[in-house]
Image: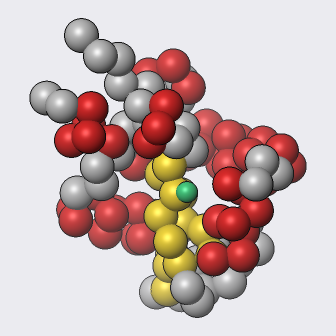
Amino acid sequence: MKLKDITHISQETRERVYQRDSYDGWACCIYCGKPRGIEVHHFIERSRGGKGIEENLVCLCKGCHTKIHQGDTDLQNFIRSYLSEHYEGWNEESLIARKE
Ligand SMILES: [Zn+2]
Ligand SMILES: [Zn+2]
């Protein structure tokens, strides 16, 4: 499998992430709770080989999504604990695709 395919988010995975991060039936930003303009973010970025799997994805609003890509460390730490609380044995290393 190509790196591009591993980091890609399938429609099915996207739906599951929306559902996990929903409140009252709406996908919300996990950080500020806004239900509008939701985008799915790779915790480990695609450029670093971050996989397109639920364990590496979170719903963010446009504003928070911009902040995280500007390197907001509070937000990064928040996402890290959010994901590790949701998945038993969650491990950052396992989210990174390695080129064979
Ligand atoms: Zn937000
Ligand atoms: Zn992103």
User: Whole-percent x and y of residue 59?
Assistant: 54, 66
**Looking at the image, residue 100 lies above or below residue 48:** above
- Nearest the viewer among 85 and 74 is 74
Q: Which residue lies at the image location 42% right of the left edge and 70% below the top edge? A: 18
Q: Position of residue 44 (x, y in %)?
A: 54, 38
Q: Quadrant of residue 46?
A: top left
Colour scheme shown: secondary structure
Looking at this view, is 99 or 15 the one in front?
99
Residue under the image location 46 percent in, 86 percent down = 25
x then y, percent, for residue 34: 68, 83
Placement of the N terminus among the 4 image quadrants: top left
Judge from the rendering whether residue 43 lies leftward or rightward of residue 53; answer left or right: right
Q: Is residue 81 visible?
A: yes
Determine whether 50 is above or below 67 in the image.
Answer: above
> Going by the picture, which residue comes out furthest to the right?
74
Q: In screen coordinates, is 98 left or right of 95? A: left
Front residue of 98 and 82: 98
Say if residue 30 shows up in the picture.
no
Outermost residue toward the left in this view = 1
